[in-house]
Amino acid sequence: MFDPNPIQAKLLKAVQNLASDNQHLIDQSRTGVNPHLSPTALAHLDIGRRTRENLEQIATAVGVPKSVIDYTRASGERGHRWQPGQPLLSTEAIDRDALLRGHLRAVAQLQTMAGVGAAFSQQGTLPREGFAAFRRVMGLHWQRVGAVGHALGLTTVEQQHAWQPTDSPWTDHVARTMATLDRTALMTQWRAVVETNFATVSMPVMVLQAAGITPDDITRQLPVLPDRMVELAAAALEPDPATGGMGGAGIDAAIEATAADSQTESEPTDHRPASHADRYRGPDMGPEP
């Protein structure tokens, strides 16, 4: 038997209920006059699927066995919604060292994301809308990484090692990584961030918050806020003035510009995703795990 802690249970509940919601929508289309799903319904299914996949990734990162995740998803696809205390069979042993290695990779990916934002801004004029989207998505990834660190119960030494696993500053590693990217590769990574569907990354963070993880819990795991990460990465890149790059001062200006009138979404430093009536709200999380 697998006995999930409250955070794991909340994640599993969201996975199962999302799978159930999507299956219900599919079943409705099969029994209706028109057996084909509308474009809106197909989009809804795609958002639900990608959100569920993100939730499953987080559940894996915090120590939920794969067999439990698979069983929970399958239960939802059979039309069963989550029930508190439902039996979860598993004989898998969770390797904490493997979880720590996974968290270290997640932190490194977050740091690389900061480098992408800094490097792309140095390519020339940066549209305000693009940088605002980047800030929103990176802010949610920052919250997710910090929440996972909290769920793993990292020691101070483990937190420090995850943030800087070598003697070199993390910004040096990011600068070396950015130096290997040509303009096309950099553009690909930038677009992968700014074109992310906001609902698919915000819903998992909302589930983690519903599980009781607070902004302070997240901040204790990560020593630098996301905007500042981009500024530090920009300083480490040392752009050639001849390219017309923005540099650290330009990053500051872009952040201030997007912060001044970006009212449609919450910002990364708010530590909380926005909620909108016209957006996908995801699975029922409820008060109980």
Image (cartoon, helix red, strand yellow):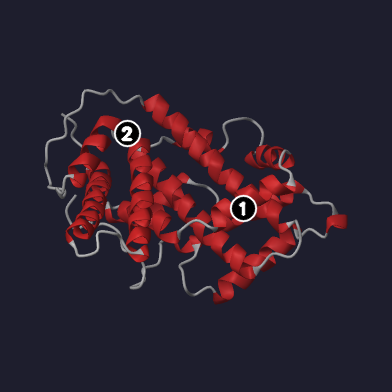
Q: What residue does disc 1 label? A: 190
Going by the numbered disc 1, the residue's amino acid type is: Trp
Residue 248, how many percent across, how many down? 72, 58
Kindly identify the residue that appears in the image at 67 percent across and 53 percent down.
118
Left or right? Give the position of 53 relative to 68. right
Q: Is residue 236 above or below residue 26?
A: above
Label 1 Cα crowd, 10 Å radius (few <14 / some 14-19 / many 20+): many
Kindly identify the residue that appears in the image at 74 percent across and 56 percent down.
122
- Asked if the residue at tag 2 contacts the one at tag 1, i.e. Cβ–Cβ closer than 8 Å, the answer is no
Indicate the quadrant containing the N terminus: top left, top right, bottom left or bottom right.
top left
Q: Is residue 28 above or below residue 68?
A: below
Left or right? Give the position of 240 relative to 155. right
Determine the secondary structure under disc 2. Answer: loop
Residue 282, how many percent across, how many down? 30, 59
Does any portion of residue 271 appear in the rendered image? no
Does any portion of residue 260 appear in the rendered image? yes
Determine the secondary structure under disc 1. Answer: helix
Q: Nearer the viewer, mark 1 or mark 2?
A: 1
Q: Which image quadrant is residue 66 in?
A: top left
Q: Closer to the camera, 162 or 190?
A: 190
Q: Is residue 145 above or below residue 28?
A: above
Q: What residue does disc 2 label? A: 63
Q: Closer to the camera, 79 or 238?
A: 79
Kindly identify the residue that appears in the image at 11 percent across and 42 percent down.
85
Q: Closer to the camera, 211 or 88?
A: 88
Residue 140, how many percent across, how many down? 46, 55
Going by the numbered disc 2, the residue's amino acid type is: Gly
N-terminal-most mark, 1 or 2: 2
